[in-house]
Image (cartoon, grey):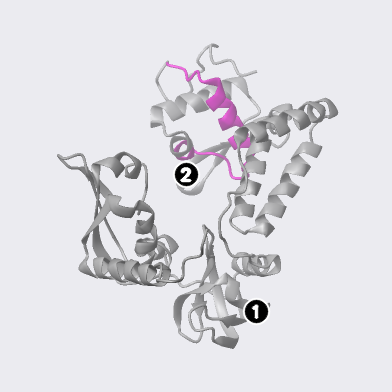
Amino acid sequence: MLDPKGKSGQRQGESETPMRYARNTDLIRLALRMQGTAEGVSLGDIMAEFEVSRSTAERMRNALLDALPQIETRGGPGGERRWRLSPRCLGGMTQPTLDEIAALHRARELATREGDSATAKDLDGLATRLQASLPAPARTRLDPDSAALLEADGVALRPGPREVIAPDILQTLRQAIMAGVWVNVDHRARASGKLSRDVWLGPLAMLLGEGRQYLVAWSEYQDDVRLFAQAGFERIELSDEVFERPDEFDLEAYLSRAFGVFQEEVQEVVWRFTPEAASEARKFLFHPTQEMSDEPDGSLTVRFRAGGMLEMCWHLFRWGDRVEVLVPEELREVYEQQLKRALTLNSLKEGSKEDG
């Protein structure tokens, strides 16, 4: 039992504060964390995971050292001290909770919605194995409770268009990324429809989300990082040749250049949302670099730096006449062109109306 009210066991060379850390839930999480790692947990790890100061991290560690003498102290790089618990030390405390099982089911539904059926299958298998590891009485209680929680949670596949990617394509790409090997593919370009055969790619990451799915990969032919629509893969084979990820490539920096996935020259972007749309727009993260400012008339100004003018237009359509593009001029021009094309294609022509 963890006893946060017990006597403070002050240690030589440790924190000198007599205060104790008394949140049982955090202490249990920390104990599980110590048991779930082979190298142990440092004070820096505790500070980062629980977002606490060093003195609070020391109090948390000291509380566990008092309650669990089985904790091992280890030396880390540079003399850093780390602490861990041996496997099975916590017994039933490591059993999954109802909320955790439900979270796996929720993640499975989200993966299914994004077209990642391979991950959905793996999550479903993990949830099944976790439930099977529970004692029989717990499994009996969990089944109806889990079903009720999932229904109350309201997680369901949202209707809407998305590309259907063959599961074997996703699985092969994931294997290539994790193994760090080249793949040989036949890929059909989305825009031109041209089929490129026998192409060598070094997969870096899969971009999954609403609508279209892409692979970020190093192209041997183009000698650079490129995006490939996953729906365009008509053949894909793993090779035994190791792909060395470019040292200078930063996925987060690469993605932050774009509003969506299209890589273009980064520009300053400024949108102005009307007072009627300001409260709703304030809830959105349009881009990681965004800055928001409230205007005297109640409108909202959003600024960020990115490329991807066409994808910005696709998003702006949802706001209708409640948003104005201030800069750049290029975005205003593309937006106007897209609106005109949509109106031309969908306008009612004389004699085309159906009766009734």
The answer to whether residue 74 is left or right of residue 302 is: right
Question: What residue did someone put label 1 on?
Answer: 234
Instruction: Tell me if mark 1 has few (under 14), some (14-19) or many (20+) residues whose alpha carbon lies within 10 angstroms of its own.
Output: some
Residue 291 vertical placement versus 213 (above, below): above
Mark 1 belongs to which amino acid? Glu
Is label 2 or label 1 in front?
A: 1
Image coords of residue 264 (percent x, y): 34, 72
Answer yes or no: is residue 14 visible: no
The one nearer the camera, 256 or 356, is: 356
Q: Which residues are magenta?
A: 19-45
Question: What residue did someone put label 2 on?
Answer: 79
Residue 151 vertical placement versus 11 (above, below): below
- Element class at badge 1: strand
The answer to whether residue 342 is left or right of residue 167 is: left
Mark 2 belongs to which amino acid? Gly
Residue 32 vertical placement versus 19 (above, below): below
Image coords of residue 89 (percent x, y): 71, 31
User: What is the CA distance from the residue labelled 2 to the residue labelled 1?
Assistant: 53 Å
